[in-house]
Amino acid sequence: MINVDGSLNVYKTKGKVDNLCEFCNDKDVSGTVGIAHTRWATHGEPSARNAHPHFSQSHNLAIIHNGIIENYADIKQRLMGKGVKFVSDTDTEVLVQLIEYIMVSKNLSLQEAVPLALYQVIGAYAIAVLDKRAPRQIVAARKQSPLVVGIGDGEFFLGSDASPIIEYTDKVVYLEDGNIAFIRLNERQEGGESDDSGMELKVTSILGEEQKLQVNTVDFDLGQIEKGGYPHFMLKEIFEQPDCLTNCMRGRVNVEADHVTLSALIDYRRQLLNAKRVIIVACGTSWHAGLIGKQLIETFCRIPVEVEYASEFRYRNPVVNKDDVVIAISQSGETADTLAAVQLAKERGAFIYGICNAIGSSIPRATHTGTYIHVGPEIGVASTKAFTGQVTVLTMFALALAEAKGTLDRDEYLKVVKGLSEIPDKIREVLKTNDHVADLARTFTYAHNFLYLGRGFSYPVALEGALKLKEISYIHAEGYPAAEMKHGPIALIDSDMPVVVVATHDAMYEKVLSNIQEIKARKGRVIALVTQGDDTIARIADEVIELPDVMECLEPLVATIPLQLLSYHVAVCKGKDVDQPRNLAKSVTVE
Ligand code: F6R
C-alpha cells in the first residue's frame, strides 16, 4: 500500500492468503493505492523472496505480474551490463527494473515508461505498477493474461477476473490485449474541493492511442461465490449441478422438451451447417468434455470430429481449412493455450465457436460465436459443474445441428431432447449416493494408485474421474478405455489396486463385464458404477454405486457425479486442501 505521504508498506507471506491476513492484523494497511498478488511459481521457488510485489533497484517502483516474460534473460543481462542489481530469480523483477531504467535514462514518468518497456517484452503479462513518488496513480497493462478494471463509487479495482471485484461493484471494463490502463486519483478531491469522484481511468493501446471504454454490468450475485453452508466450494458446486444444468438449458430446451434452440445456430447457420470437419480444442477437464462432444457430434451429425489438446494444436502447424469449425471449450475463458489455438485457427480461416462459462472473458471475445454454459462462477479449482455444463451445451449443439442437417432420426431426436431435460432430476437421484460414496472413500484412502476404466461415452468419464482424483487427493490415477487394459495396465493389478469401472447398461456392457472378471481374477478391487438393479456386477465387484437408467449418450452427465464425489471424499479423508489443491490455478493464463 502507498500512502499520500509516499510511504510504502509491503507485506508478504508464504502459503495461503489467510496467513497474510493474519500477519497483517497489527500492521498498517492504509493507503491510497495498493496491489496484491498470489503467486503461481513459474520462475524461482515459492518463497517470500520471490513473492510479488517486486521492486526496482531504487525501491520507488513496485510491480505485480501474472504471466511469463519470455525474453527476461536477455533483458536481465542487458540491464546487469548497465549496473542494475537484481535480488530475485523472477522474470517479474526484470520488467520492473526495465521500467525504472527507461524512466531514469529518458527522464520519463511511469505512465510514459510502461508502454516503452512493454514494447521490448516478449511474453504474456497482466501487470499493475506503482510509483511511490506518485501515490495517487496505478498503471496496469495486459497481453495474453486477463485483466479487468472494476469501476466503483470513487474507487477503482483491478483483478484478473470479475469475481473478486463484484463484492464492491458490478461495473467492469475488460481490457483487451495490448491495453494499458492509467488510474489516477485527482489531488483536488483530497482537498475536498471537488464533488465529483475525482478519479480518472484512461485506457490506451501500447502505441498510446486512447481506447473507447466499454463498461459491462456483471450479473452474478455474491451468494454465488459463497459456500452456502457447504464445507467446501467443490462440494457445493457438485450439489448445485441439477440447478446449474437447468439454467444452462433454460431458453434452449423448450418447456415441452421437444426442441433445442441455440442462437449461434440461427445466427451462423450457414457456417455451422456447411462444416466439413469439426476440431475441438481445449485443455484438462474441458478436453474431456470435448471427447464426449466428439461422440455426440459424430453420432448425431455425421461430421468427423478431432479433439486436440490446445497446447499441442497451437505449436504443430495443424491443417485447418476454411470450411472447418473449431470449437473452443474453456470454463475460465482465459486458458492461454486454448486462446492461442483459437487465434491460430481464426488466422487460418476457420469458423470459431466457443463454449465458455466466464462471461466476457478472452476466449468468448475471440470467437465468432458461441454458447455460454451459464453454470455460475466455479470457485473450487477442480472443475465439476463446468464440466457437466460443457457436456450439456455440446449435447444441445449436436442436437440442434443434427436437426438442421437432418442427420438424426426424428424419434431419436425427441428421445434425446426429453432425456436431456430430465438430467437435472437424474443427477438429484445420483447425489443421494453421497453418504455411500463417502463411506467407500474411507475404505480406499490407503491407495497410492487408482485405475479408471470405461468404454464409448464412458471412456472420457473414466479420464475425468482419474484427473479429479489426482488433482485434489494427489493419488496417482489413470483413465483408460476398458479394452486397453489388457495391452499394459493389467500388469499393475494386484490386491492393492482399486479399479473404478463404469459398467452401466450400454452397448458395451457385456465386454466391460468381462474386463471386471479379468480384474477380479487378478485380485484387483473393483468399484463399479452400474445401472440400478444390476445384480450381476453387484455379485462380482467389491463395491457398486448405482446410477439411474439414462440413454447411453447422456450417461456422462450422471456417471461423472459419483466420481466427483469419490475424489472429493478421498481428498477430505486425506486432509487435503480440496478447493485449492497444491500447484494448481483456477485460470491457467500461462502456457
Ligand atoms: C481440472 C481443471 C483443469 C481445467 C483446465 C482448462 O479440474 O479444472 O484441467 O479444465 O485447466 O481450464 P479451462 O476450462 O478454464 O480452459
Image (spheres, rainbow, N blue to C red):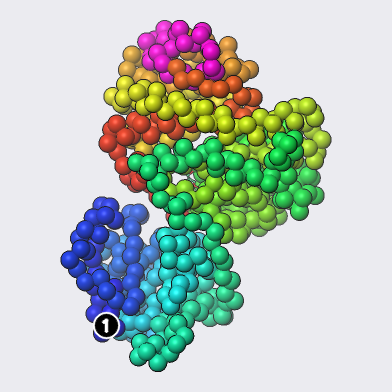
Q: Quick check: is 540 in the magenta stretch?
A: yes
The quarter of the displayed image where residue 388 is located: top right
Residue at 39% x, 26% y is 435
Drawn side of residue 215 relative to residue 181, left or right: right
Drawn side of residue 394 relative to residue 581, left or right: right
Mark 1 = which residue?
A: 6
Q: Is residue 528 above or below residue 269?
A: above
Q: Is residue 320 above or below residue 91?
A: above
Helix, strand or loop status at disc 1: loop
Total residue callouts: 1
The quarter of the displayed image where residue 248 is located: top right
Residue at 57% x, 66% y is 216
The quarter of the displayed image where residue 235 is located: top left
- Specify whether residue 446 is in view: yes
Query: Picture coordinates of residue 252 (x, y %)?
Result: 69, 44
Drawn side of residue 28 relative to residue 318, left or right: left
Q: Which residues are magenta?
A: 520-543
- Specify whether residue 466 is in view: no
Please rate how many residues cluster around mark 1, counting C-alpha atoms within 10 Å: few if below 14, some from 14 to 19, many from 20. some
Amino acid at circle 1:
Gly
Q: Is residue 461 above or below residue 8?
A: above
Query: Picture coordinates of residue 64 (x, y %)?
Result: 35, 66
Residue at 51% x, 56% y is 220
Query: Picture coordinates of residue 468 (x, y %)?
Result: 42, 35
Query: Given the current orientation, which residue lies at the most extreme left position?
Result: 26
Q: Is residue 467 above or below residue 221?
A: above
Q: Quadrant of the N terminus?
A: bottom left
Depth check: give the residue in front, 120 or 81. Answer: 120
Depth check: give the residue in front, 230 or 542. Answer: 230
Depth check: give the residue in front, 232 or 400. Answer: 232
Would the CB of label 1 be found within 8 Å of ligand 1? no
Q: Quick check: is 257 in the magenta stretch?
A: no
